[in-house]
Amino acid sequence: MHPNPVETTISDEAIEWFSKLHSGRVTPEDRNRFEDWRKRSSLHAKAYADVEMFWALLDEPARRVFEREETLASEQTDATPLIRKAGQRVARRPARRAFVGLSLAAALVMYLWLPGAFRFWTSDYHTEWGERQEITLEDGSRVSLNTHSALSVEFSPERRVIKLLEGEAYFQVRHDPDRPFIVLTAHGVAKVTGTAFNVYERDDRMTVTVSEGRVRVYTEGAEDRAIELSAGLQATGSIDGIGPVLRVDARQAPAWREGLLVFNMQPLAAVVDEINRYFPGKIIIADPRIRERVVSGAFDLTRPRDILTAIEKTLGLSSVNLSGALTLLYQPTL
């Protein structure tokens, strides 16, 4: 589901008007043209109000950055001998608030796009946002690759190695006792000779869930301390090692293969992280007080915006969308 192109254009215009009106170079004619634009329709007025709300949410962190920069500039000015004519003012660094705004914009671009870009470029297989892919490997094993995921394949006569660079994959491995099948991630290793299991690699951990057979899970270089999982068991790998082992519904982890996203008493922050893998753009929780609100349910992955709408109604939340790329989720005030 993609943003309405008309609304996206209006949102882009609203952002341009906001930037212009706060640039310090606005003229009376500019303000008149802005008022004509804003009164053109209710969509125009709402788009500009959304931008103002978004900027208000960023105001506090931006103010802190601005104050730190001003303090540093003042200290440097006080510490530097200056020679100037009588009555001449010391030139301040220009457009410091513009610098703060540009820094926030640059940070947002990096937040939305840069993480994982290089890993995707170097992969053998990868999926885009909201895309899923079925892969048959040369040994007959099958891999289901979930949204925004990437992996590389290295097969040799001695072993079959998959590097899961990012994201999630479900493996149905062709049995071969003489050539183990190994899934490598940044946070651990899963090794089998033939079975079915799910591996989810994210920034701070990997999670292995077994559907059939047995899987050995260990940190790289520590196979002698491997944990063996059977069907219905799940383990997590991180910088702290492997564990704990949990008994789970083995159908829930790979439910995405059936087009479902399932949550059972999960905090809103974790739910939003998951939805962001399928959502067009990025959802940010603007109010930290709601991060631990609990969510349960099964949702249709083909309609990610409906998932957000359902969560809003259930938890009494609201959201603001900017240019189709960024959605802020917050608790409305009474």
Image (cartoon, rainbow, N blue to C red):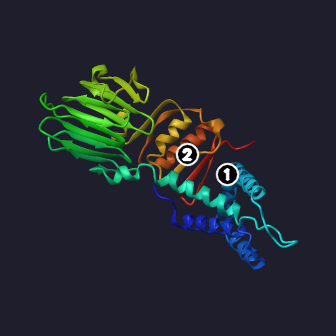
Viewer-proximal residue, 260 or 156?
156
| Coordinates of residue 162 in the picture (x, y in percent) | 25, 40
Task: Label 1, secondary structure: give it.
Answer: helix
C-alpha gap between disc 1 and disc 2: 24 Å
Disc 1 versus disc 2: nearer the observer: 1
Task: Label 2, secondary structure: give it.
Answer: helix
Residue linked to disc 1 = 58
| Coordinates of residue 205 in the picture (x, y in percent) | 42, 33
Give the residue at x 35% y 51%.
120
Q: Is residue 324 above or below residue 154?
A: below
Q: Is residue 197 above or below residue 100?
A: above
Kindly check if marks 1 and 2 are in contact, taking CB atoms under 8 A apart as contact: no
Residue 282 in view of the camera: yes
The amino acid pointed to by label 1 is Leu
Within 10 angstroms of label 2, few (less than 14), some, or many (20 or more) residues?
A: few
Give the residue at x 56% y 60%.
323
Residue linked to disc 2 = 309
Q: Is residue 14 above or below residue 211?
A: below
The quarter of the picture where residue 299 lies is top left
Residue 281 in view of the camera: no
Q: Residue furthest right?
A: 87
The amino acid pointed to by label 2 is Thr
Q: Earlier in the sequence, mark 1 or mark 2?
A: 1
